[in-house]
Amino acid sequence: MLDALIKVHNQMPDYTLTIELTERANTKMIMDVELLRSAMYATSNGLKLSLDDVGTGVNQFEMLKPILPFVSELKFALQNFKAELKQAYNKLYFWQQLANFQGKKFVLEGIETEEDLVVAQQLAVGYGQGFYYDRPQQFY
C-alpha cells in the first residue's frame, strides 16, 4: 500500500500527500518496529504523516514517541473529552506545546460550539476543524 501511495505522490509533484495514521479497534496489533519502519519509509519517499487523535486511547506520548520525528502534523480531538473538559484542556495544551516545540502543524479537531472556538482562539490554535464550521461534504 505504501508503494502505491508513493507512486501516486511521485506522479503529482505539485501536491503533497499526507497519510493520516488513526487508531482503530480491531484484533490486529501493529508492532512498534513495523510502524517505525513504515513511517521512515513513507517520509523518506516524500510522504507526510499526520497523527490523528493524539492523547486519546493508546495514542499516548510514550507509545507515539518513536515515530514523532517522522510526523509533520498532530491532531487533537477535543470532542473525545466533552465529559472531562479540565483533562481535555491539559492534554490539549500538552500536545499543542509539543507540536510547537518540534515544529509540527497542530490541528484542533472537534470544534463544535462557540465555546470550543473561544478555547481555540485563547490558545492561538492555527488550524481547526469540526461541525462548528460545517459537516463533511460528499464530493462525488
Image (cartoon, grey):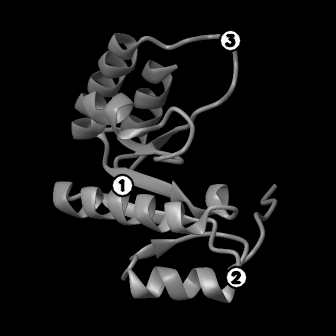
Q: Is mark 1 on a helix, strand or loop?
A: loop
Q: In the image shown, does 48 or 100 lie closer to the viewer?
A: 100
- Number of residues whose C-alpha sits closer than 10 Å to that of mark 1, classed few (under 14), some (14–19) or many (20 or more): few
**Residue behind mark 1:** 14
**Observer able to see residue 45:** no
Q: How many labels does the image show?
A: 3
Give the amino acid at mark 1.
Asp
Distance from the alpha carbon under mark 1 to that under mark 3: 38 Å
Find residue 27 and name its label. 3
The image quarter containing residue 116 is bottom right
**Observer able to see residue 61:** yes
Give the amino acid at mark 2.
Thr
Distance from the alpha carbon under mark 2 to that under mark 1: 36 Å
Q: Horizontally, is 62 left or right of 9 in the view?
A: left
Residue at position x 29%, y 22% in the image: 41
Residue at position x 69%, y 62% in the image: 83
Q: Which numbered disc, 2 or 1, marks the residue that appears first in the sequence?
A: 1
Q: Which of marks 1 and 3 is in front?
A: 3
Give the amino acid at mark 3.
Thr
The image quarter containing residue 33 is top left
- Number of residues whose C-alpha sits closer than 10 Å to that of mark 2, classed few (under 14), some (14–19) or many (20 or more): few
Find residue 113 and name its label. 2
